[in-house]
Amino acid sequence: MSVVRAIPAKKLINDPLDVVNEFIEGLVETYPGLNYLEGFPQVKVVFRADIPCGKGTYDKVAVISGGGGGHEPAHAGFVGEGMLTAAICGDVFSSPPVDSILAGIRAVTGPKGCLLIVKNYTGDRLNFGLAAEEAKTEGFDVETIFVEDDCALPPPRGIAGRRGLAGTVLVQKVAGAAAAAGLSLADVAAEAKHASEVVGTMGVALHPCTLPGMGLADRLGPEKMEYGLGIHGEPGAAVTNIQPVDDVVSHVLKKILSKETNYVPIPPGSRVVLMINGLGATPLMELMIAAGKAVPKLLVEHGMAVERVYTGSFMTSLDMQGFSISIMRADPSILLRLDAETKAPYWPVAVEGNRPPTKLPVPIPPSRSAKSSEPRKLPLKLNEQGKLLKAAIEAGANAIINIKDKLNEWDSAVGDGDCGSTMFRGAKQILEDIEKHTILCKAACIQLQTSSHSVVMPKTWAEALAAAIAAVKKYGKAEAGYRTLLDALIPALSTLEKELDSGSDPSTAFIISSAAALDGAQSTKHMIAKAGRATYVSAENQSSVPDPGAMAAASWYSAAAHAVKAKKYKH
């Protein structure tokens, strides 16, 4: 019987047991406004460095939150004037101990008292609750609110209630701004409690998180995704096949705003705040795509206008691949607090202020050299040379489309594996609009326009190719032998000029020069790259394949040559 061994996850860490401690060390080194308590690493308390520690003189309500590590930047990254006064950190996915929470309360609480904001998990409730009771016996004025914004699981949830998720960060901001404004503890607690009651969150993940020092865990597999995972990787509400993000966003919004559960009292016609929260391993590109889809869906599908959008990673789950969406009712008092200034390092900047109802793209300024604002069009009827050119362009574009996968394969060995896909997109665009120019074609076009010949002669095309090559050399800083597309085009130009000078038929000269292009492209297997991303790749890898760019150039050149030959013989 074979034994399956777990593959350790790759992590840039030291001892897995020290990751939270070392995160805190890096955080306070990075941000001068943050400090941590003596007793570290057993006592993991990050607090505002501008507050006299333990003096009991802070003249505003202290706002304290915290929880297990692994959710960074939450919560220590939100410590700063206008947000949290202190954050209590536990080990990865472990509630901070009572002694640490009590130490944080003692460190920053003054005569106006402190508010504890606690995510609704049993360990956090117990430990923060015990610390609060002990602090009260020491004479501290303490209030506690619990955030349970999870909307993924159906009611009833028994005595455990709903989980606290990324909506907690919005509640922390409301409370911190209220405290900074000088409100009493009762008023700060009331605003925070109200904010917690009008926010809902639900997450979706493609891959669960991996604990430091543990093996890779992928219970979902390559084709599945899961709705409603907890931020500790606990199973969620449903496992489904991977869906387009349009469908994912619609489903999540529908669950958060469900009339059946009525978790979040936000009726149609309301104004809302939207948070798209990365769970740790989701590229910003994907988060922004989700944000861009969620705003119009809230308006069209739910009748809600979005007043603020916060997109980024606020409360993560180590390296979980996915995101959560939080919706909060945008009461005027809540917007006031969310827009208030804060020095918390991980609260997003440049988000405050009213959003326009819709954003329309601004027209592109016209070219200064254009004689008319009318878009250029193909003539109604092409002359013979025009037909030849059109055939050559279309053949070259189709040749690129046909070898997309092969170009990607070659580029995977010497680059980032997208040469074929990039060329494919360009070729498709050329076929859609025959007048689109690359830098190569643009330079060639200028040469043709400035040619002294009244009729475009075969040698004029050679001159245009020479101008195109010169432009690529100028802006790409490449030369022959650098393992680029020039190693296909320069031999092609040399052969074309030689054949035309010897009196060869132009279309035959074109065919012969295309063979030189293919030979030149193949010869790049024996070259060491001196330009482009291949310069970072080993010589061994380079020698295994020809340069993808050179092969692409040779392919379209050859296709164009044969198309011209076929067109001429047809007539």
Image (cartoon, helix red, strand yellow):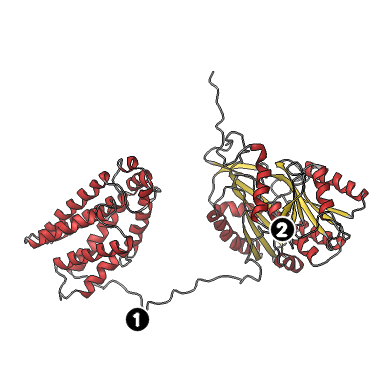
Farthest-out residue, left:
503
Name above or below for residue 191 compared with residue 232: below
Query: Which one is closest to the eye, mark 2 or mark 1?
Result: 2
Mark yes or no: residue 271 visible: yes
Q: Number of numbered discs present?
A: 2
> Distance from label 2 to label 1 (Cα)?
52 Å
Farthest-out residue, top:
1
> Label 1 is placed on what type of residue?
Ser
Residue 443 drawn at (x, y percent): 27, 68
Circle 1 SS class:
loop
Task: Please report the residue visible at 92 percent of the width from the left and 49 percent of the height from the top.
Answer: 138
Instruction: Identify the residue position indicated by label 2 in the image.
Output: 170
> Label 2 is placed on what type of residue?
Leu
Mark yes or no: residue 569 visible: no
In the drawing, does residue 315 fall left or right of residue 545?
right
Residue 282 drawn at (x, y percent): 56, 50
Q: Are marks 2 and 1 in contact (CB under 8 Å)?
A: no
Assign the N terminus to one quadrant of the image.
top right
Say few, some or many: other residues with alpha carbon within 10 Å of mark 2 (under 14 / 14 to 19 / 20 or more). many
Residue 62: image quadrant is bottom right
Residue 461: image quadrant is bottom left
Task: Please report the residue visible at 60 percent of the width from the left and 54 percent of the height from the top.
Answer: 249
Say few, some or many: other residues with alpha carbon within 10 Å of mark 1 (under 14 / 14 to 19 / 20 or more). few
Instruction: Identify the residue position indicated by label 1 in the image.
Output: 372
Task: Please report the residue visible at 27 percent of the width from the left and 59 percent of the height from the top.
Answer: 394
First of labels 2, 1 by sequence position = 2
Residue 171 drawn at (x, y percent): 75, 57
Assign the C terminus to one quadrant of the image.
bottom left
In the drawing, does residue 468 fall left or right of residue 568?
right
